[in-house]
Amino acid sequence: MKRIILIFIICLTVTQLKANVIANLKSTPVTKFDFLLKDYRNAINLQISRYMNEVDNFRVRLDKIKMNFAFDEETQLFIIDLYARVDQNRYSQKKIKIKKRDCNIIRNKIFVNKYGYGMLLSSKPTSYFTKNYITNNAIFLLKNTSLNNEEKKEIIKKSIINIELDHPSANQNITCKGTLNQVPLN
């Protein structure tokens, strides 16, 4: 009998705790900005997974990409940090060196789905690959939002990207950063 009463009391307590959690969630206001952050992050993650699933010998092969996405309240900027580790087997066996161009190609393929460089030994971006071109093509990341094109372009302009490429040889790691639509990244 004591056990039954004890179980009944525990069930009532757990039910009350669940009700409090749901009430707290319902009372928390969700803003349009929260949805924007979620959609932007999800769109970038989708593009990263597409990049990782593509088989392409003309770009950097990666083992993994990790993304950290945040909004800095002070500077009013979207911060996108990408950490990419190159294919350890390929880059250690063939002694392939990575370049700043590879860093830019990763950004280009993820956000615009284009290389932005000529295919053979070109170290300069192609002539059509400009700041406006990147901005106009990257706004598709925000297609699920109710923003107009001018607002989407403003968000792209206020997005900072930091890419760190990790090579098997520690002295060959490369980082590049800049605004999302900067040609090329520094």
Image (cartoon, rainbow, N blue to C red):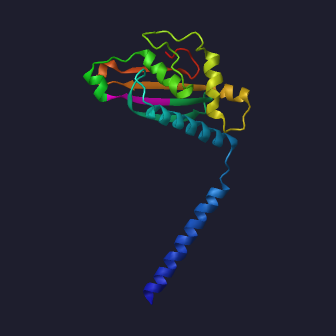
Give left or right: position of 86 versus 41.
left
**Can residue 118 be seen in this snapshot?**
yes
Figure quadrant of residue 92? top left
Q: Which residues are magenta?
A: 81-87
Vertical comparison of 61 with 182: above or below: below
Is residue 56 covered in magenta?
no
| Residue 176 visible in rendering | no
Looking at the image, which residue is at 46% across and 85% down? 4
Q: Quadrant of residue 17?
A: bottom right
Q: Residue at x 60, y 64 (%)?
A: 20
Q: Position of residue 69 (x, y in %)?
A: 53, 35
Q: Which is the main secondary structure of the residues drawn in magenta?
A: strand
- Relative vertical location of residue 114 with respect to residue 44 in this rendering, above or below: above
**Residue 160 vs residue 63, the one in the foreground:** 63
x%, y% of residue 186?
Answer: 49, 15
Side of 147 relative to 168 (left or right)? right
